[in-house]
Image (cartoon, grey):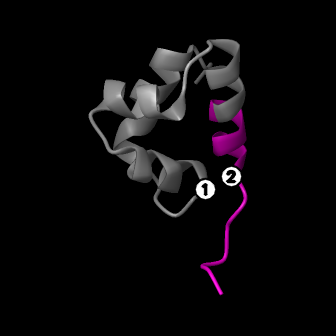
């Protein structure tokens, strides 16, 4: 039995949609933020708030505040 997989948070869904719109991967976003892809994934699924990165994520992906 593996770990329970959490779905995307509302913010996670918004981020994923913008990544697709911008033809960008979550790994590329993580690299731009200076975090690991694993940590990016935890933000997308709500396992980490990623509070200190949210403003920068929104700037990079042109998400309205």
Numbered circle sitting on residue 9:
2
**Left or right, 54 with reference to 6:** left
Question: Quarter of the image holding residue 5?
Answer: bottom right
Disc 2 to disc 1, C-alpha distance: 6 Å
Q: Residue furthest bottom?
A: 1
Q: Answer whether residue 34 is visible to the viewer in this image.
A: yes
Label 1, residues with CA under 10 Å away: few <14, some 14-19, many ≥20 = some
Where are the magenta residues, as a range? Answer: 1-15
Image coordinates of residue 61 in percent, x first then y, are 55, 18
Position of the N terminus by quadrant: bottom right
Question: Quarter of the image holding residue 34?
Answer: top left
Q: Residue furthest left?
A: 34
What secondary structure is found at the residue carrying circle 1?
loop
Q: Residue furthest front?
A: 1
Q: Which residue is mark 1?
A: 45
What's the residue at 62%, 32% (across, down)? 15
What's the residue at 66%, 77% (across, down)? 4
What secondary structure is found at the residue carrying circle 2?
loop
The answer to whether residue 26 is above or below residue 45 is above
Position of the C terminus by quadrant: top right
């Amino acid at each position: 039995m593996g770990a329970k997989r959490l779905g995307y948070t509302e913010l996670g869904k918004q981020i994923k949609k913008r990544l697709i719109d911008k033809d960008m991967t979550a790994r590329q976003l993580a690299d731009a933020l200076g975090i690991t892809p694993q940590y990016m994934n935890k933000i997308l699924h709500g396992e980490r708030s990623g509070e200190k990165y949210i403003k920068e994520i929104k700037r990079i992906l042109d998400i309205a505040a």
